[in-house]
Amino acid sequence: MATTISLEQEINPWEAQAARFDYAARKLNLEDGLWKVLRQPSREIIVHFPVQMDDGRFEVFTGYRVQHSQARGPGKGGIRYAPDVTLDEVRALASWMTWKCAVVNIPFGGAKGGVICDPKTMSQGELERVTRRYTAEIIDFIGPEKDVPAPDLGTNEQTMAWIMDTYSMHMRQTVTSVVTGKPLSIGGSRGRREATGRGVRKVCDEALRFLEMPREGCRVILQGFGNVGSNAARLMMEAGYKIIGIAEYDGGLFNRDGIDIHALAEHRLRNGTILDFRGAEAADPDELLTTECEVLIPAAMENVITSRNADRIKARIVAEGANGPTTAVADDILAEKRIFVIPDILANAGGVTASYFEWVQDRQGYFWKEDTVNERLEAILADSFEDVVRYAEAHAVNNRIAAYMLAMDRVAFAIKQRGIYA
Ligand code: NAD
């Protein structure tokens, strides 16, 4: 797949997505018409809307909602608040959602949203007004049967509560199933908060079984100790893995005998950082990525494994907790090194799977026990892992391309069965 491209092209999320898509489409012998249909998002909404700031000024914000495909069900995907959100990024993330939902075979299409703003510098009141007005601007295009948003970077349970309330006010009735990732008291699901980390642990268990490697003492290094990374680390430590390294944006930790994740979580809660934790030595976060271990889990952000460091990765397994942590060029390097990659659209699909459960529970008006959520989640991820590795074997491709091919096959089949409305 590798061609000579600049680093800028290599890390452009839309290019990264398109490179995998084109390659998988060729392998799949996808017919030309379906290739064209699936390569582009079906709808892109751009809104510019005014919000009154705390000091009385009016500010105009730009928001996006991109719906890549609704062939298999309503759109599904988070809303990101960040100063550098771009349409290309939202497009890429929307199409990733289509493939992710199809890999785990849940009845959703793919969508994603974003607002260009810096939530770190805004008050709660400003964030609430941005959220309500953005929701009002896109209200015709979202809904339980149309497109169901969820949190992403810079948004959280509170943001979802405001969206749910705004939508409900317009509909003149409470509609909890319009968003997922809500607080438990207003239709959230038990187990949702740690679902992505739980899914990461589950696919790692499956990979060890597949590769016939022992779990006890299996060395793990994570990048990112946020929602995904901290939950994955805790659940994996509890299951017998040895977490030897954690990289954060402001520094890293290393302990060859294993880091006590419960103690580290308490330390972070008290101090607001993982640094100066007594149970590990300080380490360079970039070097941690290339330190020897059995499992490396990038769980922070995009483009951390690139042509610049992929040849130095010494893990046996890379489990992508984050979205898009590996570039397409780096993929080829990891494949040459025979590193077993569990691609993002499978490895971090626990979050959207639990979101699907939340949507089902809201529509049923009947809420499940946490054990039920966890059991069903793990069963879906185990089945999906099996589907992907079997597909990889059958088609002699790596796991990422297999996951794309499997997903594209499912979406293309749905489009064919529905036929093209004219
Ligand atoms: P988060 O904000 O809770 O955590 C991210 C963590 O990464 C933070 O602790 C942050 O300090 C750290 N970080 C930021 N930049 C870093 C850097 N340069 N080096 C090391 N650490 C850095 O976010 P999250 O919800 O855990 O999401 C992490 C990734 O997982 C994102 O790519 C997100 O899209 C993806 N993801 C999240 C979910 C979910 O349910 N939360 C689901 C699927 C995918």
Image (cartoon, rainbow, N blue to C red):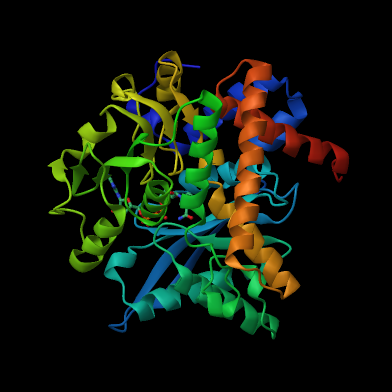
Q: Position of residue 125 (x, y in %)?
A: 37, 81
Q: Position of residue 181 (x, y in %)?
A: 53, 65
| Residue at left offset 51%, top offset 69% | 134
Compared to residue 313, the image places residue 112 above or below, namely below
Quadrant location, the C terminus: top right
Q: Position of residue 261 (x, y in %)?
A: 30, 53
Of 276 and 15, which appears nearest the observer?
276
Q: Position of residue 141 (x, y in %)?
A: 66, 63
Q: Quadrant of residue 332?
A: top left
Of 95 and 180, which appears nearest the observer?
180
171 relative position to 93: left or right: right
Q: Quadrant of residue 143?
A: bottom right
Compared to residue 257, the image places residue 331 above or below, namely above
Of 28 and 359, which appears nearest the observer?
359
> Could one spot residue 215 in this view of the protein?
yes
| Residue at left offset 52%, top offset 76% | 161
